[in-house]
């Protein structure tokens, strides 16, 4: 698994803290660097492949010697930004060389020119200052752990010391949402435990003066993301289509062949069709399913592949193999989360076929109305004008399951509504479990004037970044697969947030109509459910022993009340609790079992 890691200390030292880079699959190329002032240590590992170039090995130092950098990710417009730099002595085509030379020439403002998914750590040898950065949407993760002498950081949580000991607030978040949440603001030296570095942020870490965090996206002061001046429906569809084609084209660039995951979803079909148009006869598509699953989805994928002209492959996983991969996926978890296993199995199946890079449709639902919140929240927002008591009575009569979730919202806006709707456990559940009260997550400051865009923004940073993106990156990279997500190109995201909402409708209507010619006639009328795992059946059958061992470890950890844990498992076995909530306890038990001296 590709990983960067490092440490900066306030006092010069010749000793490195005991940091371990995780190695999951195959031989890896590793490099490390200690600064001349002996304050900063940087290291990087990645799976060895045929594209290794000594000139682009990490850590990499700029030609002038000012910056030394470790990098993880992809800069999709690397070739274009190179043309804007006054530099001709390129030694490779690597993104990390583009970044380090750009920083040396333009400083941290160079990040504003970049598109893609990335994290990096760059040490300024002249100023004795560390620069940390993360991409705008948070596709690539970065974690921080403060200690009395300085700061540890890494693109994997488990590579940092104390990663198996979960903070009390993290445990409450996993119980409430199924995953831990990301902070909106930079977690400074007062932060305890291991914290996620916020998306769209840069920070200068200084040893002799206050640190300097800067949010570069959304640009500050808050951008006024008003509706785009689009008047005509046809022009709106054409404009969106052009932007989507550009995003897909940039994600196809590279020396390694890029394949498309082709399920029965609208998103994957659009990506496969656009990729085939951009690279005729050069795209392979893959469908992954369990042995014995319905043939309906497979036949739809074959039809789509024939229509767009891809070389299609069907990968069937036998149940015993899938069960073994589920166990491996649980052990490979980098952060506590109740989801991500499906991504792990799909990635594992693709890597067995020699695939290294694949396109994923993550982000389309959140931007174009494929989630339930785009239907429900507009109705709930109308109720904000009612007195609180009347509003609660109305919800109790119309939506009795929602009323308890929405009873004590601090603000009746899209951000807090979505947080409440995403919760599994309420405050009473947390109290019964002896978990600490849940802290409300702050919104990233942004001024989006349309209700539709506000809902999409909340979807992106309440659920997508802390759950879907972290899981997609961690679980795929654990297998050695890189997932690229064209729908989350930041320029496409900004456009989707600003498209006049009269053109947007639930069910991804605008996306469907903009790309209708890419799909076979009638294809959208017979979409099948996506690939899922029968986890509820497995957890009470072949995975029961595994689950019980992790639940026992959780009971012995002292993190939660043992009686409450047993009560919830019994409710799951009786069919009164969804499997995700029961699995979240198993996940916490996995981390508790690791936290054993």
Image (spheres, helix red, strand yellow):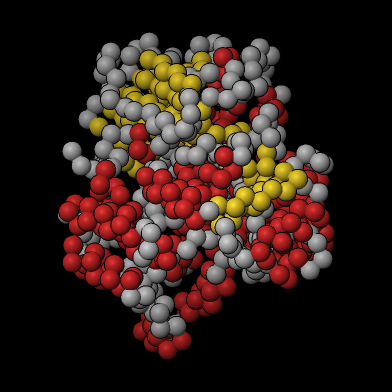
Residue 130 placement: quadrant: top left
Q: Quadrant of the C terminus?
A: top left
Viewer-closest of 165 and 47: 47
Residue 391 location, x and y as percent? 42, 83
**Horizontal placement of 457 versus 537: left or right?**
right
Residue at image coords 38%, 14%: 35
Question: Which residue ends up furthest to the bottom in the rendered image?
Answer: 397
x 27%, y 16%: residue: 15
In the figure, 33 relative to 341: above or below? above
Q: Is residue 96 left or right of residue 198?
A: right
Residue 451, percent from left and from top? 57, 66
- Number of numbered discs present? 0
* Quarter of the rendering containing residue 150: top left
| Residue 469 appears in the figure | no
Report the residue at 59% width, 43% height from top.
350
The structure residue drawn at horizontal position 18% and vertical position 62%, both measured from the top left corner, is 562
Where, by quadrant of the figure, is residue 148 drawn? top left
């Amino acid at each position: 698994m590709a990983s960067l890691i490092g440490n900066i200390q306030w006092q010069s030292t010749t000793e490195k803290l005991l940091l371990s880079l995780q190695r999951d699959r195959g031989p890896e190329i590793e490099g490390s660097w200690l600064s001349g002032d002996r304050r900063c240590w940087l290291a990087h590992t990645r799976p060895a492949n045929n594209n290794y170039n000594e000139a682009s090995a990490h850590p990499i130092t700029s030609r002038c010697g000012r910056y030394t950098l470790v990098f993880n990710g992809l800069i999709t417009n690397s070739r274009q930004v190179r043309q804007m730099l006054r530099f001709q002595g390129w030694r490779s085509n690597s993104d990390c060389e583009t970044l380090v030379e750009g920083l040396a020439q333009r400083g941290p403002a160079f990040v504003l020119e970049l598109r893609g998914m990335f994290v990096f750590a760059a040490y300024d040898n002249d100023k004795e200052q560390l620069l940390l950065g993360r991409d705008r949407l948070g596709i690539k993760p970065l974690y921080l752990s403060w200690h009395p002498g300085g700061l540890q950081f890494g693109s994997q949580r488990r590579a940092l010391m104390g990663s198996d000991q979960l903070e009390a607030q993290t445990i409450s978040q996993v119980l409430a949402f199924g995953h831990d949440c990301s902070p909106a603001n930079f977690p400074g030296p007062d932060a305890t435990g291991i914290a996620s570095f916020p998306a769209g942020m840069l920070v200068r870490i200084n040893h002799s003066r206050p640190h300097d965090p800067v949010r570069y996206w959304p640009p500050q002061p808050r951008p006024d993301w008003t509706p785009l001046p689009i008047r005509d429906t046809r022009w709106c569809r054409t404009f969106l289509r052009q932007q989507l084609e550009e995003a897909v084209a940039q994600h196809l660039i590279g020396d390694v062949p890029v394949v498309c995951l082709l399920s029965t979803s609208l998103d994957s079909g659009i990506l496969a069709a656009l990729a085939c148009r951009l690279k005729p006869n050069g795209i392979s598509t893959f469908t992954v399913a369990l042995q014995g699953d319905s043939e309906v989805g497979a036949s739809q994928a074959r039809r789509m592949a024939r229509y767009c002209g891809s070389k299609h492959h069907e990968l069937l996983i036998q149940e015993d193999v899938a069960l073994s991969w589920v166990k491996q996926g649980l052990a490979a978890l980098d952060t506590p989360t109740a989801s991500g296993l499906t991504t792990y199995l799909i990635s594992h199946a693709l890597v067995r076929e020699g695939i290294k890079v694949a396109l994923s449709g993550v982000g389309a639902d959140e931007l174009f109305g494929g989630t339930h919140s785009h239907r429900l929240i507009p109705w709930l927002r109308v109720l904000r004008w009612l007195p609180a008591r009347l509003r609660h009575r109305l919800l109790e009569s119309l939506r009795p399951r929602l009323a308890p979730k929405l009873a004590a919202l601090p603000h009746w806006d899209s951000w807090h509504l979505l947080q409440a709707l995403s919760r599994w456990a309420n405050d009473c559940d947390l109290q019964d479990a002896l978990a600490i009260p849940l802290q409300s997550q702050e919104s990233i400051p942004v001024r989006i004037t349309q209700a539709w865009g506000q809902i999409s923004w909340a979807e992106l940073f309440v659920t997508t970044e802390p759950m879907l993106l972290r899981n997609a990156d961690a679980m795929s990279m654990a297998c050695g697969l890189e997932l690229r997500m064209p729908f989350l190109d930041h320029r496409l995201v900004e456009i989707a947030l600003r498209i006049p909402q009269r053109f947007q409708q639930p069910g991804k209507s605008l996306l469907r109509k903009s790309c209708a010619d890419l799909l076979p006639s009638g294809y959208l009328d017979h979409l099948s459910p996506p690939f899922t795992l029968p986890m509820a059946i497995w957890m009470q059958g072949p995975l029961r022993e595994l689950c019980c061992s992790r639940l026992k470890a959780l009971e012995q950890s002292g993190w939660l009340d043992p009686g409450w844990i047993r009560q919830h498992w019994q409710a799951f076995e009786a069919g009164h609790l969804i499997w995700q909530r029961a699995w979240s306890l198993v996940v916490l038990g996995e981390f508790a079992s690791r936290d054993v001296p």
